Image (cartoon, rainbow, N blue to C red):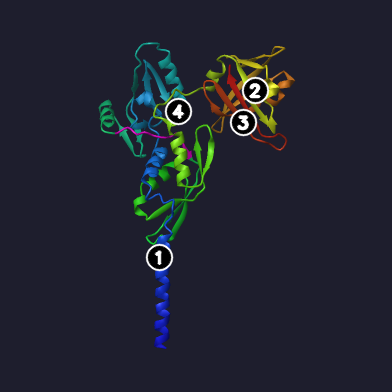
Amino acid sequence: MKRLLILIATCFLTLSCETEETAVSNVPQDNLVTNSALKGKLLRVLQSPTTVDNFIDGSGCFAVQFPYTVVANGQQVNLTSEADYAEVYSILNANGSNADVVTLQFPVTVTYADYTEATLNTQAQFDAAVSNCTESTELSCMDFTYPVGIKTYNSSYQLAESFDISTKEALYGFLNTLETYDAVVFDYPVVFNVPDAGAVAAADNQALEQQIDMYAPQCGSAVSPPVVLEEVLVQDTWYVSYYFSITDQTSDYQGYGFTFANDNTIAVNAGTPSFGIWAVNEIDGQTKLGLAFIDPALAAIGPMQAWTVTGLTDTEIVLHIDSTGTEPERYLTLTKN
């Protein structure tokens, strides 16, 4: 009986050794703990944006939290969201070649790149905060689609935990704790949002890092003035550069030009002049452009279709309508002549 127990114990010990050796030889290839380069890039992607208000606070160290008040060239502006930046820009642009002066009204609360906060009660405290910090080089034009799946491993590289992270701030904080794990991997594939291309799937660390490197130059640290749809529309004439509904039907709109006026009318320049109306609304956090035309040939982009604005520059407006029970999905791009 003793010999049998010794034999069984020996077998268990042998199995334990074999399991440990197998685990060590199967260290995850996409281990974030040992990939400091990718971790550094991800922290720049996930950090709290700090450059969005540089034209107001003059610092990329932090961003001022809403609500707050500024005096821009002598005019007081109450800011409650990024949409209010447009009013400050308008005041500054109207000043011509004169020097612009933007003064913060204290106290203000600021958020640093690492999501820590500080309340600054005076200009002296603000100046000291600026001089005592290092400006970040953020990559805020990219981000994940959440939730993001995470797998962590113990010292024997056995799967210890699998969970989801639901916010950008939470993922930033988690990446700053990687040294407490032996191995951490994303639950690939992950969906990563990049400029122009929108959502792309990354299958491993290499693919994710390639996406970051590819689009990093488009992020930069400088922030351009926000583009306001109503202001862009009334500049010059527009044409349909792309229309898709089941098939590409862009050619149906060749020869049409659209001139948007401040009174919400549209002059349609075609073989036979016509007109329409336009309206802009904010619905559930999305900008909607409504179009209506009297020309039956323009029925597919009107009357009063609630187009969602998915892209906007000074020269291009990208629009989309989801499919319904009776209507297919549609895509429309207006380009400035």
Percent coordinates x, y for residue 181 in the rendering: 37, 54
Write down the residue under mark 1.
21
> Which sits in the foreground, 218 or 290?
218
Is disc 4 placed on a helix, strand or loop? helix
Q: Quadrant of residue 26?
A: bottom left
Tag 2 and tag 4, C-beta contact below 8 Å: no
- Residue in view at x 37 percent, y 42 percent: 40
Based on the picture, tell me whether residue 135 belongs to the magenta stretch: yes
Q: Earlier in the sequence, mark 2 or mark 3?
A: 2
What label sits on residue 291 in the rendered view? 2
Instruction: Judge depth for marks 2 and 1 and give the one in front.
Output: 1
Report crowding for label 1: few under 14, some 14 to 19, many 20 or more residues within 10 A (C-alpha): few
Q: Secondary structure at mark 2?
A: strand
Q: CA distance from mark 3 to mark 4?
A: 23 Å
Asked if marks 2 and 3 touch (Cβ < 8 Å), the reply is no
Q: Closer to the N terminus: mark 1 or mark 3?
A: 1
Q: Report the span colored magenta.
A: 134-143
The correct choice, above or below, for 270 with respect to 171 in the image is above
Residue 82: mark:
4
Whichever of labels 3 and 4 marks the residue nearer the N terminus, that label is 4
Give the residue at mark 3: 320
Amino acid type indicated by mark 3? His
Q: Amino acid at mark 1?
A: Glu
Q: Pointers 2 and 1 in contact (CB under 8 A)?
A: no
The amino acid type found where label 4 is placed reads: Glu
Q: Is disc 1 in contact with disc 4, using a CB cutoff of under 8 Å?
A: no
Of tags 1 and 3, which is closer to the observer? Answer: 1
The alpha-carbon separation of the residues under discs 1 and 4 comes to: 55 Å
